Image (tube, helix red, strand yellow):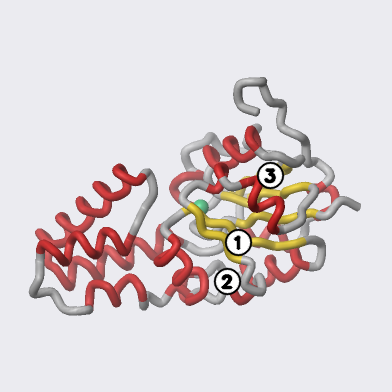
Amino acid sequence: MPRTAFLVDVDNTLLDNDGAKNEMDRRVASLLGEQGRAEFWETYETVRSELSVVDIPLTLGRFVAKHPGLGPELADLFMRFPFREFVYPSSLEVLQRLSGFGVVAIVSDGDAIYQSVKIYRSGLGQAVDGLVIVVPHKEESLRQIAAASAAERFVVVDDKPAVIERISARSPIPVASIFVRQGKYAATVAPGEWSGASMTVSSISDLLDFDLESIASMARQPVRDSTTA
Ligand SMILES: [Mg+2]
C-alpha cells in the first residue's frame, strides 16, 4: 500500500477559528475600546494584504509602535489565548485514527510564530507528535512536504475550497481531498457534495467513521499543462 500522508488543516478544520476570532475581537474591544479595536483590525488587514497572509506578531508590532503606552496585555491576548477551548470535540480522536493509517501532518497557512503557538497551545501539535508545518501558502511547499513525510500520496483535509483546488492542481504526488464543511470559507460553496473535492463531510467528526483506505485510494495525479510543471 502506498505510504499516505494526511495534510490536516487547523483553522475551521480542527479548531473553531471563527469562534476564537470572535472571542479575540470581544477581548480587543474591551482592552482598547471601540476606536482602538477598529484601528487594530485595520492594521491586521493592511498586514494581511501586504503579505497575502495573516501575521499577528507583525500586526502587534505595528500597532504597539503607534501606541507606545500599551502594556503587554494585547500581545498576551493573542499569544496566550485559550485555544484549547476552541478545538472541535472529536479533533484529537480523528488525528489518532488517521495516524493508525498513515503519516499525519498538521499543515497550516500563517505566520510561523503565532500559528505555531496556537497549534501547540491547543494541544493539536502534541496529537500529531510534533509534525507541524506552518508556511505562508501550503500549495507552494508541496514538494518539501511530500519529501519530509516520505509520502507517496496525499489526503488533504481542509475547510477552504480554494486551498483544496490549488493543492489538487499542484501536488507532485497523487492527491485526494476531504472538504470539511465548517466555518465561513466552507459556506461559500453551495450546500451538498462539493465537486472540487474527492469527498465532502459536514464535520470533522465524520472522519471517525469513514473508510480511510477508500478515501486514500481516490488519490489522483494532477493533470498538468507544460507551463506549470
Ligand atoms: Mg482552514
* Disc 1 residue type (three-letter): Ile
| Image quadrant in which you'd find residue 61 | bottom left
Tag on residue 124? 2
Q: Nearer the viewer, residue 117 or 16?
A: 117
Q: Position of residue 128 (x, y in %)?
A: 66, 70
| Lower position in the chain sequence, tag 3 or tag 2 | 2
Would the CB of label 1 be found within 8 Å of ligand 1? no
Is label 1 in contact with label 2 (beta carbons under 8 Å)? yes
Q: Nearer the viewer, residue 41 or 59?
A: 59
Q: Where is residue 187 in the image (x, y as percent from the top left)?
A: 48, 43
| Cα separation between marks 1 and 2 | 8 Å
Is label 3 in contact with label 2 (beta carbons under 8 Å)? no
Q: In this view, does 85 lie above or below 57?
A: below
* Disc 3 residue type (three-letter): Ser
Q: Nearer the viewer, residue 11 or 199?
A: 11
In the picture, the quarter occupied by the C terminus is top right
Left or right relative to 186: residue 68: left
Q: Residues within 10 Å of mark 3 (few under 14, many from 20)?
A: many
Please give the name of the residue rendered at 72% of the width and 49% of the height, measured from the top-left corner. Answer: 155
Nearer the observer, disc 1 or disc 3?
1
Judging from the image, what secondary structure is the residue with disc 3 in? strand
Left or right relative to 125: residue 110: left
Tag on residue 106? 1
Judging from the image, what secondary structure is the residue with disc 2 in? helix
Please name the residue that numbered disc 3 is placed on.
Answer: 177
| Cα separation between marks 1 and 3 | 15 Å
Q: Position of residue 152 (x, y in %)?
A: 80, 48
Q: Is residue 223 above or below residue 37?
A: above
| Cα separation between marks 3 and 2 | 20 Å
Q: How crowded is mark 2: few (under 14 residues within 10 Å), some or many (20 or more)?
A: many
Q: Position of residue 163 (x, y in %)?
A: 54, 42
Q: Which residue lies furthest to the right in this view?
A: 1
